[in-house]
Each structure stands twice: as structure tokens, then as C-alpha cells.
Image: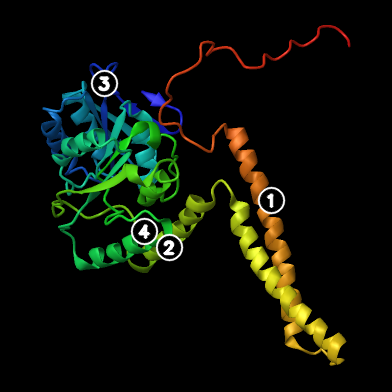
């Protein structure tokens, strides 16, 4: 079956009993993992066979050039009750593939998993139980005994610390794909670019840090092939740094970007005014020449820069307000409502009817 957006959907699963309590959806993005698909599907089904919730497994083929799509079709055909697949028209990246799976997910709880067999599916049920029992919105896997080379572990550890410091969401392992989400909160986050690395930080803009936790999970060495996602070395570091700066800005100033630019503008403009004020006192009080002083040019430059930053802050505030109003996206997320009045459906101030005919 074909759906808009450039993806072919393979027999979407309909979880049994989805109308009652919680339903679990497991999303797995895949690229060139033909040797792992069937084994992964078998492991997930075995791990969830005794789960107390209805569940579905969604396999997303992110433009693979091998037979990953064929293997997904085989897995779905073997268990159409619980499995479904999405075949993207080309490789859009891990973040986009993950978003495609989330869009297809029907669960109240969503789990994401790597397709390389390094995450242990047996951790899913335990983590979902903790998410529900502890009333969390996000539970992040922590690969404490990571089975990768030091060239991957060392940059990852440094990156995790930097991300935690900049975003205020201290986690040991941002890069672990095994995460459990409350769907009502995750669906408020749209994933673009390389945002999958920073989903916990984006979630922190919608929920309390007390509702985000982590748990140790198993990690196995890769059995077949090598990692297909992400650049390595310097190129990967540059991409992560740029994404981190963008994400840190949105996390702290998404609803009030004018505060960010305004602070810089006031600091620059204030410093420039102090310089110009001192030069004015020197000129008027002491009669000294100031035309050739570099401090005069620096002061004027700082004042101009300050004005530009303040104006930029005003423009970004207007854009932010326009976006929130046009998108219908409130600046808050209600967890639950308690009670209600007798006339719940009646507006407090009924809108008067428009007069007919000419005024």
C-alpha cells in the first residue's frame, strides 16, 4: 500500500485489544541490514511474546540498496498480526526513518531500537514496566558495558558530557537508540535533520526532568556488516557540534528567542556606550583629541552591533509568536485535567451572532 510522503507501507499491523489499556509499538530504522532483519524480528517477537500489552513491531527500510526490503516483507508475511513495515523511496537518514515509524505507530508507548542486533530486545519489557510504574515520559537506555571500539566510545563519552552541560539534561548515553517514550509526549516532537541524537533534550522542553530517567541495558558486538548511519571522525564531530548548538538554542529559547539576541545586544550596546561615554568625558572634560583613538571606532561598532542584535531579537519574537499561532502549537503540554464545571461545553462568553444584511 502506498501513502503520501514517499513511503510504501507493508501490511500495517493491527494490535489486538488496542482499545483498552496501553499498547506498545517498537520502531526499528534499517539501512542495508539484510543479514539482521529476520534475526531481529525473531528476537523481538520472542522478547515480547509474554508482554502484558498488545504490541506491534514496525520495520522501516531507509532506502537500502541490498535486500533489506525483501527481508522486511518476509518477516511481515510470517506474522502480519504484529509486524508491519515501511519502505522509504530513498535514504532519508536515521532521523527521518525513525519519524516514519513513529507516524505509523499506534501505541500509547513507543520503543525505538537499533537494527544491528547490538541492542537486546529483552530489555524492552522491563523498561516499559518501569516507564509505566514510575510514571515517566522517557526512559533512556545506558550501554554501560558498551561493546564497541575505543574510537567510538571515547568521543561518545565526551559528547554525552557536553550535551548534558549545554542542555541541562544529564544522561550517560545519548547515543543509545533503545529508548522508551510515552507516545502522547513524543508525538509533540517532530524529528528533522540529525535530531535523533538529542531527543531527550527536545523532550525536556515538553516535560519535567523528573519524568526522564535512564536504565542500564545490554549491548552486544555487531555480528554482520558495519554501521551504515552517520559519518565518522572529524566530519561526524562537526555535524554533532552544529546540531548541538542548534538544539541548545531551541531548548532554552524556543518560546522567547528575543531574550537570547536581546542579551547579546544589550551587552554589546552597553559596552559601546560606556566606551563612548568615557571618550566624551575625555573630550569635553580634558579637551583631549579622540578622533584617532581605536576605542572610538570600537565603541561605535559595538553600539551598532547591539542595535542590530536587539532588532533581530524583536524580529525573532514576532516569528516565534506567528509560528505558535499559525501552527496551533501551545507553549505548554497538559498532563491531565481534574474536575470540571457543570456547564463544561458552554463558553463563558457566547460569541454574538453576526448581523444579517447590510449594517
- Quarter of the image that includes the C terminus: top right
Identified at 26% across, 51% down, the residue is 176
Q: Which residue is mark 1?
A: 315
Write down the quadrant of residue 309 in the picture: bottom right
Q: In the image, 335: left or right of 173? A: right
The label number, if any, that marks residue 3 in the structure image:
none
- Quarter of the image that includes the N terminus: top left
Marks 2 and 3 close (CB-CB < 8 Å)? no
Q: Which residue is mark 2?
A: 241
- Mark closer to the observer (3, 1): 3
- Mark closer to the observer (1, 4): 4
Residue 291 visible in the snapshot: no
Write down the quadrant of residue 234 in the picture: bottom left
> Mark 2 vs mark 1: which is more N-terminal?
2
Q: Which residue is mark 4?
A: 164
| Relative vertical location of residue 27 with respect to residue 357 in this rendering, above or below | below
Q: Position of residue 211 (x, y in %)?
A: 33, 42
Mark 2, other Cα within 10 Å: few <14 / some 14–19 / many ≥20: some
Q: Position of residue 187 (x, y in %)?
A: 41, 34
Q: Secondary structure at mark 4?
A: helix
- Mark closer to the observer (2, 1): 1
Q: Nearer the viewer, residue 15 or 313?
A: 313
Marks 2 and 1 close (CB-CB < 8 Å)? no
- Mark closer to the observer (4, 2): 4
Marks 3 and 4 close (CB-CB < 8 Å)? no
Q: Secondary structure at mark 3?
A: loop
Q: In the image, 151: left or right of 238? A: left
Q: In the image, 224: left or right of 308? A: left
Amino acid at each position: 500500500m502506498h501513502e503520501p510522503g514517499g513511503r510504501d507501507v507493508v501490511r500495517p499491523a493491527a494490535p489486538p485489544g488496542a482499545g483498552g489499556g496501553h499498547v506498545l509499538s517498537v520502531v526499528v530504522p534499517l539501512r542495508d541490514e539484510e543479514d539482521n532483519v529476520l534475526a531481529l524480528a525473531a528476537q523481538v517477537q520472542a522478547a515480547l511474546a509474554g508482554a502484558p500489552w498488545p504490541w506491534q513491531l514496525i520495520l522501516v527500510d531507509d532506502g537500502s540498496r541490498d535486500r533489506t526490503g525483501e527481508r522486511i516483507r518476509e518477516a511481515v508475511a510470517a506474522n502480519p498480526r504484529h509486524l508491519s513495515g515501511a519502505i522509504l523511496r530513498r535514504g532519508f537518514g536515521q532521523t527521518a526513518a525513525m519519524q516514519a515509524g513513529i507516524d505509523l505507530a499506534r501505541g500509547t508507548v513507543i520503543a525505538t531500537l537499533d537494527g544491528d542486533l547490538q541492542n537486546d530486545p529483552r530489555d524492552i519489557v522491563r523498561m516499559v514496566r518501569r516507564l509505566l510504574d514510575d510514571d515517566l515520559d522517557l526512559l533512556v537506555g545506558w550501554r554501560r558495558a558498551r561493546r564497541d571500539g575505543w574510537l567510538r566510545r571515547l568521543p561518545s563519552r565526551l559528547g554525552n558530557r557536553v550535551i548534558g552541560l549545554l542542555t541541562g539534561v544529564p544522561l550517560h548515553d545519548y547515543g543509545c537508540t533503545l529508548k522508551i517514550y510515552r507516545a502522547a509526549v513524543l508525538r509533540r516532537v517532530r524529528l528533522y535533520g540529525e535530531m535523533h541524537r538529542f531527543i531527550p533534550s527536545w523532550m525536556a522542553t515538553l516535560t519535567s526532568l523528573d519524568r526522564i530517567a535512564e536504565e542500564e541495558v545490554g549491548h552486544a558486538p555487531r555480528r554482520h556488516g558495519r554501521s551504515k548511519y552517520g559519518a565518522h571522525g572529524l566530519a561526524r564531530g562537526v555535524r554533532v557540534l552544529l546540531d548541538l548548538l542548534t538544539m541548545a538554542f531551541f531548548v532554552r529559547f524556543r518560546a522567547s528567542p528575543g531574550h537570547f539576541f536581546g542579551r547579546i545586544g544589550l551587552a554589546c550596546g552597553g559596552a559601546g556606550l560606556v566606551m563612548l561615554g568615557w571618550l566624551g568625558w575625555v573630550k569635553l572634560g580634558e579637551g583631549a583629541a579622540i578622533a584617532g583613538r581605536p576605542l572610538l571606532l570600537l565603541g561605535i561598532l559595538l553600539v551598532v552591533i547591539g542595535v542590530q542584535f536587539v532588532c533581530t531579537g524583536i524580529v525573532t519574537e514576532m516569528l516565534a509568536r506567528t509560528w505558535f499561532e499559525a501552527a496551533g502549537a501551545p507553549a505548554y503540554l497538559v498532563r491531565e485535567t481534574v474536575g470540571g464545571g457543570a456547564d463544561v461545553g458552554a463558553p463563558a462568553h457566547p460569541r454574538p451572532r453576526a448581523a444579517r444584511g447590510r449594517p
